[in-house]
Image: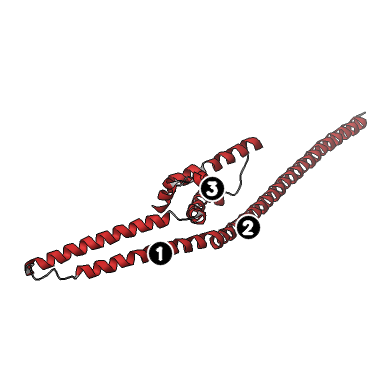
Amino acid sequence: MDVKYGANTKIEDSHRMYQLQKANFDGEVNSRKAEAQLAYELQAAKMKQKIRNEEIEIDVVERRKQISVEEKEILRREKELTATIRLPAEAEAYRVEMVAQGKSSPLLARAGRRRWRWPGPRQSASRWPGAAEGYAIEAVGKADAERMRMKAAAYKQFGDAAILSLVLDTLPKIAAEVSAPLAKTEEIVMVSGDDRTVAEVTKLVSQIPPTVQALTGVDLTKCLLRLKTPSLCGEEERDAIQS
C-alpha cells in the first residue's frame, strides 16, 4: 500500500507540475500573440498615416502647380490687355496731350515777347522792373489757363479705349489684394453646400464695381454699358478719370 500510495502521489505531483508549466507556456504564447497583434496594428496605423501624408503632399504639389499655371495665365492676359488696349490708349492720351501743348505754345511765346517789351520813355526807369514782372505774370497765367482749358477739352475727347485703360490699371491691383491670402493657403475645406459657395462668390464679385468707383471715381457699370449706349457715361466719370 505504501508503494502504491507513493506512486500515486508522484503521479499527482507530476500532473500538477505539468499543468503549471502548461499554464505558464500558454500565458507566454498569448502574451507574444498580443504583442504581435499590437505591433501589427501599430505598423498598419503608421503605414496609413504615411500614405495619408503622401497623398496630402501630392495634393499640395498639384495645387502649387495649378496656382503657378493660373499666375502665368494672369500674366499672359495682362500682357495681352497691355498690347491691345492699354498701350493704344496711352498713345492716344499722349497724342491728345501733345496737341494741347502744341496749341498753347503760341500763347507762351507771345507771353515771353511781351515780358521783355520796353514800356516806353515816358515811364520812369524805377517802375520798369515791376511793370515787366507784372506783364510776365499776367501773360504766363493766361497761357496756363488756356493750356488747362485745352487739356480739359482734349480729355473730353478720350475714347472708350482710354477709359477702359484707366479702369484696367486699377482692377489688377484689387484682384491681387483679394487673392493674396489664397496664395498662402495649402488646404481649403468647404463646409457649406455648392449653392452657398456660388452665392458667396457672386457676392464678392458684385462688390468690385463699388470698390472701383470708391478708388477711382469711375462708375464701372455705366462705362461698360457705354460700349453699347455711349450716353450712359457722362462728364462726371470723365472728370474723375482726369483727376
Q: Is residue 192 visible?
A: no
| In this view, the mark in front (3 or 2) | 3
| In this view, the mark in front (3 or 1) | 1
Q: Earlier in the sequence, mark 1 or mark 2?
A: 2
Distance of label 3 from label 1 (alpha carbons): 27 Å
Q: Is residue 87 left or right of residue 217?
A: right
Q: Is residue 44 above or below residue 150?
A: above
Q: Position of residue 167 (x, y in %)?
A: 49, 52
Q: Is residue 159 above or below residue 116?
A: above
Distance of label 3 from label 2 (alpha carbons): 29 Å
* Residue of label 2: 69
Residue 144: image quadrant is bottom left
Q: Position of residue 83 (x, y in %)?
A: 55, 63
Instruction: Report the quarter where the N terminus lies.
Output: top right
Distance of label 1 from label 2 (alpha carbons): 43 Å
* Residue of label 1: 99
Circle on res. 224: 3
